[in-house]
């Protein structure tokens, strides 16, 4: 790695922590609250999604500009082209389809900064029920309107995801509605893992897979699949330097909560990883790299200008890590960067195109 100070490498139990990092002692990791998803659960999720009206098998395209720059064969897994503009619909539909008729009838309730809210609203529409989405105060008006466009009722509440989720939980208990978490549940992780299945089918034997991390559902699902099917591949998560919740948790050997969040990448602005997602990321990820907001916005601009790909800031984090060198792509290696979402607001677009370091 070119910036050893900017990442938390290989805290999985099979590895040794680097000097200066907290060693995860035996028993230091809390057991996940529920059962852990398996590869079989991911295959079952894929079947279920097909039966639930389907999701897009998103393309994994070669990125000439990034390949030339890095001297590696870099591909982009375009979850930005997924229904509702992000991978989130995979987990949301996988969860919603496992609700029984009574649970469905009470409506769906969730908390989200945007993409998961759109996905739950879309799932509710397919189920013929309602969706209420608690969105934190920092969520963008653009994403609130998108949730409403999918038929969701938006309630703005709380300073972050966890505060919004507490409100969602109250409403679900009051109304007997089904509470759909954004990341910390086996059904959500298994659903997100279906992106990993497509990835390894379209690009067998990748050397390196890079995934944006917020609460860790996408990284957990993708890493579970990639490490199970391609054990030689390295899988790295990426977080904003201003919201390094998983990186700090891996250092501490347990999920820790950050005191402050300082990033404009709203989709990955999460104070604490989930218990289940932490345990899975600890087991399967090779490390978590940190990228600055200027690097993230620069990557949004790079994708637009050089690859004709629309990515929101969270969605461009993996590309930011490769462009900045926070994750090292060895020359000649086969690399996949997951472009996790394309719900780019006009404000974020303007910032990407005008801010210092706004791209080549
Ligand atoms: C575009 C995008 N990328 C990544 C993430 C992070 O996903 P997870 O919470 O599963 O880590 C999100 C979460 O909302 C997102 O919207």
Image (cartoon, rainbow, N blue to C red):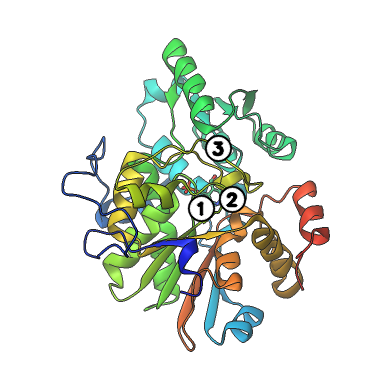
Viewer-nearest residue: 142 or 15: 15
Q: Earlier in the sequence, mark 1 or mark 3?
A: 1
Instruction: Relative to 95, say whether 18 is above or below.
Output: below
> Secondary structure under badge 1?
loop
Q: How many marks?
A: 3
- What label does residue 83 carry, if any? 2
Q: Position of residue 314 (x, y in %)?
A: 60, 53
Q: Earlier in the sequence, mark 2 or mark 1?
A: 1
Query: Residue at coordinates 60% horizontally, 70% vertically from top-left?
Result: 324
Q: What residue did someone put label 1 on?
A: 55
Q: Earlier in the sequence, mark 3 or mark 2?
A: 2
Q: Position of residue 109 (x, y in %)?
A: 50, 25
**343 to the left or right of 355:** left
> Secondary structure under badge 2?
helix
Q: Position of residue 63 (x, y in %)?
A: 61, 78
Question: Contact (CB < 8 A) between labels 2 and 1?
Answer: yes
Check the picture and name the quadrant holding the C terminus.
bottom right
Viewer-nearest residue: 294 or 53: 294
Q: What residue did someone put label 3 on?
A: 260
CB of mark 2 near ligand 1 (< 8 Å): no
**130 to the left or right of 12:** right
Viewer-nearest residue: 22 or 281: 22
Q: CA distance from mark 3 to mark 2?
A: 32 Å
**133 to the left or right of 105:** right
> Secondary structure under badge 3?
loop
Q: CA distance from mark 1 to mark 3?
A: 35 Å
Circle 1 Cα neighbour tier, 10 Å, few/some/many (<14 / 14–19 / ≥20): some
């Amino acid at each position: 790695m070119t910036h050893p100070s900017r990442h938390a490498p290989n805290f999985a139990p099979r590895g040794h922590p680097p000097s200066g990092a907290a060693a995860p002692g035996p028993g230091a990791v809390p057991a996940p609250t529920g059962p852990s998803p398996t590869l079989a659960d991911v295959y079952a999720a894929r079947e279920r999604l097909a039966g639930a009206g389907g999701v897009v098998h998103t393309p994994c395209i070669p990125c000439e500009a990034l390949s030339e720059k890095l001297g590696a064969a870099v591909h982009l897994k375009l979850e930005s082209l997924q229904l509702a503009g992000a991978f989130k619909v995979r987990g949301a539909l996988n969860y919603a389809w496992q609700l029984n008729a009574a649970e469905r009838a009470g409506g769906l309730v969730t908390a989200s900064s945007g993409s998961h809210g759109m996905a739950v609203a879309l799932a509710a529409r397919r189920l013929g029920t309602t969706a209420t989405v608690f969105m934190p105060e920092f969520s963008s008006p653009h994403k609130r309107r998108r949730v409403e466009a999918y038929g969701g009722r938006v309630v703005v509440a709380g300073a972050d995801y966890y505060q919004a989720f507490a409100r969602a939980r109250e409403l679900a208990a009051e109304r007997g509605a089904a509470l759909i978490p954004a990341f910390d549940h086996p059904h959500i992780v298994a659903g997100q893992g279906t992106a990993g299945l497509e990835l390894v089918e379209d690009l067998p034997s990748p050397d390196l897979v890079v995934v944006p991390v917020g609460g860790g559902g996408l990284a957990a699902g993708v890493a579970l699949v990639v490490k199970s099917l391609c054990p030689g591949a390295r899988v790295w998560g990426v977080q904003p330097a201003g919201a390094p919740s998983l990186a700090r948790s891996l250092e501490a050997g347990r999920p820790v909560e950050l005191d402050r969040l300082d990033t404009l990448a709203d989709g990955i602005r999460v104070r604490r990883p989930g218990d289940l997602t932490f345990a899975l990321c600890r087991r399967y990820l090779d490390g978590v790299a940190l990228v600055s907001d200027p690097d993230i916005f620069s990557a949004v601009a790079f994708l637009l200008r050089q690859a004709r790909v629309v990515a929101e800031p969270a969605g461009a984090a993996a590309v930011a890590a490769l462009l900045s060198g926070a994750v090292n792509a060895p020359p000649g290696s086969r690399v996949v960067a997951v472009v996790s979402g394309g719900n780019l607001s006009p404000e974020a677009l303007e910032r990407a195109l005008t801010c210092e370091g706004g791209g080549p």
